Image (spheres, grey):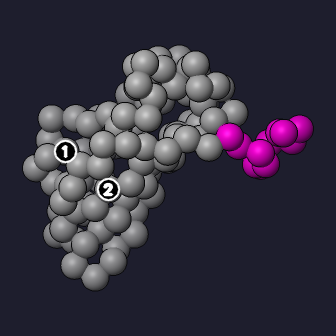
Amino acid sequence: MIARIWYGRTKRQDAETYSEYVSRTGIKALKATDGNLGAYLLRRIDGDEAEFAVLSLWESIAKVRNFAGKATEKAVYYPEDERYLLRLDPRVRHFEVLAGPADGLH
C-alpha cells in the first residue's frame, strides 16, 4: 500500500471555504479513482494561516498513476487552488505503508 501526501497553506480566513472546495474537487476525484483505498483532508489552524494535508491511500504506485498521471511526484491542482493557496508546491510525497489499522497489513 502507498500513502500519497500533499501539503498546502491558506490564509486563516479562507480555511473553511478552501476545506469545502478541496472536498468537492480533490477529495472527490481521489475517492473516485480506481486503486484508491481512501482519502483524508486534514486541517490545522496556525496563527493567521491554515495548514492542510491531503492523505490518500493506494493499492500501488501504479494505481497512483490513474490519478496523477505518469509523473506521480507532481502535485495535482484544480482551477481555484491559486486563489486560496499561499504557495503551489509542485511536488507530493509517497510512502510505503508498513503498518496500519487493518489486520494483516505489512
Looking at the rendered structure, which numbered label has been put on residue 8? 2
Mark 1: few/some/many CA within 10 Å (<14, 14-19, 20+): some
- Characterize the magenta stretch by its predominant secondary structure: loop
Residue at 41% of width from left, 25% of height from top? 71
| Outermost residue, left side | 83
Name the quarter where the N terminus is drawn: top right
Residue 2 visible in the picture: yes
In the displayed structure, does residue 94 sit left or right of residue 25?
right
Camera-side residue: 98 or 55?
98
Q: CA distance from mark 2 to mark 1?
A: 10 Å
The secondary structure type at the circle numbered 1 is helix
**Residue 18 located left or right of residue 53:** left
Instruction: Give me the residue at 53% from left, 17% from top.
Output: 34
Between 61 and 25, the one nearer to me in the picture: 61
Is 95 placed left or right of 88 in the picture? right
Q: Earlier in the sequence, mark 2 or mark 1?
A: 2
Q: Residue 73 versus residue 7: which sits nearer the camera?
A: 73
Q: Amino acid at mark 2?
A: Gly
- The answer to whether the residue labelled 2 contacts the one labelled 1, judged by CB atoms less than 8 Å apart, is yes
- Residue 17 point in image, percent of width and height: 20, 55
Q: Residue furthest bottom?
A: 47
Residue 11 location (% of width, % of height) = 18, 68
Q: Quadrant of the C terminus?
A: top right
93, above or below 69, in the image = below
Name which residue lies at 63% across and 35% down. 2
Type of residue at label 1?
A: Asp
Start-end of magenta stretch: 96-106
Residue 55 on the magenta span: no
Considering the numbered disc 2 on the image, is that residue within a helix, a strand or a loop?
A: strand
Task: Please provide percent x and percent y for residue 97.
Answer: 71, 43
Circle 1 sits on which residue? 81
